[in-house]
Amino acid sequence: MIIPALGSTQIDLGKPVFTVDVHGVALRDPSAWPEPLQGLAPLEWNYFKSGRVALCVTPELQYEITRGQDLASLPWTAYQRYKKSQLFKSRPSGTTLSLTAQDADTLWTGISDILWPRIPRGELNTRQRADVSQLYFHTVANSSVTDSAFLTCDGNTLGKTNIIRAELGVNVLTFTDAWDDYQPRFSLDQPTAGELSTFAQDQSALLQQLSTRSSL
């Protein structure tokens, strides 16, 4: 493990906990999603309808967390900002990592080296830095949960699943693989195609309402 805090404690919340790669979230009807993303729709159903799963989205959109930070202080500042997020504050005791500044830097650098081993940290582009940030957040917020995983369709991250599990203790899955794995183990509700389509339309309408209100 990259730092001693990883893998030291495992907390069972009684349901699976997933961190969703925000770059993989699609707003189209689920029937139009690619196969690796298809599992997101029933997972969202179980999150919103029954609460049988927990879905987390990292507080990371471009520079929401890392904006304005020099690279030397970025890992510690990101951790401090994560701690102020509502998601982090709502996590049950023992599920989040407590890091020192040195731990934060070692963890961030280690994740960067896993995802982009040939690119110096100072040369990562915005998208690459966001990939590091999202996996960093999942590791800090959810890696201590027994049944947790980082869900993504990103080929680079999926190609590093073995080393990520070995170095971070984190499972990385596609949305569909997560559904296929966790649905039978946790008896998750299995909505019909029609129910998912209606659910997607309702979600789209809600997003439109929120967008309209925010522009007022």
Image (spheres, helix red, strand yellow):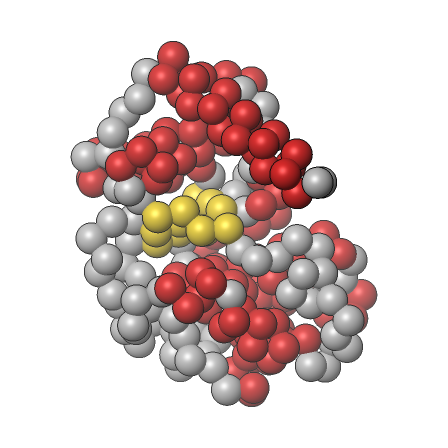
Q: Nearer the viewer, residue 193 or 36?
A: 193
Looking at the image, how many numbered discs can be counted on the residues? 0
Residue for point 26% across, 37% down? 50
Q: Nearer the viewer, residue 190 or 154?
A: 190
Residue for point 60% across, 62% down? 133
- Viewer can see residue 190: yes
Q: Nearer the viewer, residue 207 or 65?
A: 207
Q: Residue furthest top?
A: 194
Left or right of residue 116, residue 196 in this image: left
Left or right of residue 184, residue 143 in this image: right
Where is the N terminus found, in terms of image quarters?
Answer: bottom left
Residue for point 49% across, 46% down? 20
Where residue 37 sits in the image (x, y, percent)?
50, 31
Residue for point 44% across, 33% down? 40
Give the vertical position of 43 relative to 79 (above or below): above
- Viewer can see residue 30: no
Where residue 174 sits in the image (x, y, percent)?
46, 39
Q: Residue furthest front?
A: 216
For residue 95, which quarter of the picture? bottom left
Where residue 190 sits in the image (x, y, percent)?
27, 25
For residue 73, which quarter of the picture? bottom right
Where residue 197 sits in the image (x, y, percent)?
44, 17
